[in-house]
Amino acid sequence: MKIKVPTILAAVFLCSQMLAYGASHVPGPAQSQKTEPKSGNGNGSTAPVAPSTADPDYKIGAMDVLQIDVWKEPEITRQIPVRPDGKISLPLLNDVQAQGMTAMQLAGVIRDGLTKYLVNPQVTVTVTTINSRRVFITGEMSRTGAIPLLPNMTALQALSSAGGFTPFARMKDIYILRMENGRQVKYPFHYKDVVKGKKPEENILLQPNDVIVVP
């Protein structure tokens, strides 16, 4: 039996068209998967950041990060950290004292300074990251170092965020160091008694830069 060449060519052509159609309708990576946005800080890292504040009475401190928004002035609008000396640097104004002010007070100072150069400047200041309010945990803990000082945080709450004691921790000898009027004051903290409710007065409210020592 002889098969004509035109018949073979037609069959090959039909098969190629069917394969091409099937390939074009197979969902690719972009069709079969949806890319979920990654959480993090925008640079590929998922490390936690210090919290921001919406408290209108919060006083700005050194190393806090501020968002300065000046309406229709992109060259002045920026995110900027407060320097260790408590100041920030802005175009036209140079150094501006920020430490000790609320966000609204600082916005007023910036606005008043810009009126020399701009007509009716509209300024908004937001504290985006709090770095000035920290306490420190050192000694026989799973995690040591600085942690953000949250509103009304007690010594027990701070210790609970440090991952637990090591096997060598002397829990009855824990103490808190605080600078008061230029001198260092030591506050005892008997962990087991505090947990049992026997010495609630030792579970003090922490202040910025307190150091909890776990011998």
Image (spheres, rainbow, N blue to C red):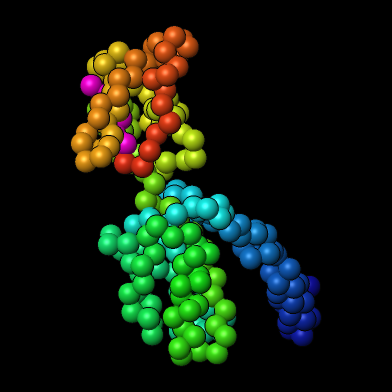
Q: Does the magenta stretch include residue 212?
A: yes
117 lies left or right of 169: right
Give the quarter of the figure containing the N terminus: bottom right
Left/right of residue 110 with respect to residue 123 in the rendered view: left
Q: Quadrant of residue 141?
A: top left
Q: Residue at left 44%, top 9%?
A: 198
Q: In this orientation, which residue lies closer to the viewer: 195 or 46?
A: 195
Magenta range: 210-215
Q: Could you say where residue 38 lies in the image, as x and y percent from the top left? A: 54, 56
> Residue 105's x, y, as percent?
49, 65
Query: Quadrant of the rendered structure where residue 66 is?
Result: bottom left
Name the foreground residue: 82 vs 202. Answer: 202
Q: Residue 113 lies in what quarter of the image?
A: bottom left
- The residue positioned 46% from the left and 90% from the top of the image is 117
Q: Residue at x 65, y 59 (%)?
A: 34
Figure check: 205 above or below 10? above
Image location (x, y in percent) of residue 2:
77, 77
